[in-house]
Image (cartoon, rainbow, N blue to C red):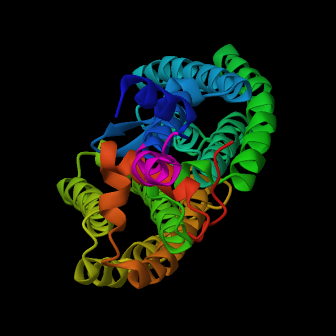
Amino acid sequence: MTSDEGVALLTTASPPDYSSRGATLQTPSSENVMNRRVNETILKTVPGLRKTFFGKFKSFELIEREEWLFLFFSLMSIMTTVCFTIYRLCFAAAINPKSDDVLLGIILLINTVFCLYHLLHGVFRDQYFDIMTFLLTTAAVIGYVFLNFFGKDESTNVNRENFRHPTVKLARLIVTCLLGMPVICLGVVIVAKYWRSNYILFRLVGGRTDLQLACGNVLLIHTLLSLAVNSMLSFLVAKYYMDMIDGDTAVIFTYFLYSGVACLWATLGYLSLRFEKKLWIVWFIMLGFLPPTLTVFDTIQVSHEDNIFTTIRFGAILISTIIACSSCLLLILAALYALKFCNIGLSERMYSMDDEDAWRIVTTLRQPDVEVGEGRVE
């Protein structure tokens, strides 16, 4: 073949068709690269969760404007309540340690500590149960403040007709009510928002409906545990405080014994869910009938005392008993429901966060054939 014939062949021959082979070799890798870039973009643009020993919480980037306002007014309410309560507590304890002002001051401090827990836990985990409990605890604090201002003091036998209320009690009442109004209004808005969106459940356990139900039940149990411990500690203070001031060793021992048992019971409930131990949950349910039984029995005993129904002390005992019984019964029902979801890998999903979990969440979001519950990313 001459050079002229070779040139003519090169110019006239059509180029070989590599389209089919190129598609086979190039398309999958290109698609994988593109999918990976899309996944990385999603992971970078959607703020993540903060991993802690107690689970995953929202980062500050996810807190919205109304949530910041709610946090501001709530923290202001808690701080003012604590300041007024400590001032009044020190003043009343210097005059009469057995005064009901001291008793109500201690109960208020206990409730404000749990208020702070429910506030932070509710906002940073999108938990409407915690926000509802915070609103309930805030209402209980307002009720204690009203009870302290208008109620009859058992220790001094005075009431509002013949006793001029100190300025601190009046200021605490006004400030608590003024700050409580925006807290309750914003709290209702946030509860409705969290109720409509199960965003945090989706980020915790992915799109499986059964895992979302189990996760929501576990978070509800955490809320009820703190509420039960709060009410039981308040009840024990209201029941045994007067006798503890007298230095009764048996009463002091009984108080710390009951308090320790309540905390151990709550710890058992938390650990049984944390490690998905079915036997521990059964023990937790069986022991859950003791707190309401003891509180009701002690309340009936206190009601037999003379002229007890009009006192601040009995009002505090009655409120604590109602909350303790309600929370314990709800805990038993929620724990029975939790037995259904043991050993499904819930604890691993809730308390671990690594790159594989993040890719699993994004993959679940992208796959059309995976059953997705109510959770969604907005």
Q: Is residue 22 above or below residue 228?
A: above
Q: Position of residue 126 (x, y in %)?
A: 59, 45
Q: Is residue 155 visible?
A: yes
Q: Is residue 366 above or below residue 184?
A: below
| Residue 16 sits inside the magenta stretch | yes
Residue 222 quadrant: bottom left
Residue at 62%, 26% (x, y): give it: 71
Residue at 58%, 30% (x, y): give it: 62
Residue 56 quadrant: top left
User: Which contiguous range is marked in magenta?
Assistant: 15-29
Q: Is residue 230 visible?
A: no
Dominant secondary structure, magenta: helix
| Residue 277 sits inside the magenta stretch | no
Q: Position of residue 353 (x, y in %)?
A: 33, 45
Near-viewer residue (35 or 336): 35
Residue at 51%, 68% (x, y): give it: 217
Q: Is residue 182 above or below residue 273?
A: above
Residue at 34%, 39% (x, y): give it: 51
Near-viewer residue (171 or 186): 186
Q: Position of residue 242 (x, y in %)?
A: 39, 48
Near-viewer residue (207 or 85): 207
Q: Position of residue 329 (x, y in %)?
A: 52, 76
Near-viewer residue (154 or 227): 227
Please state if 57 lies on the left or on the right of 146 as rendered.
left
Please state if 235 lies on the left or on the right of 199 as rendered.
left
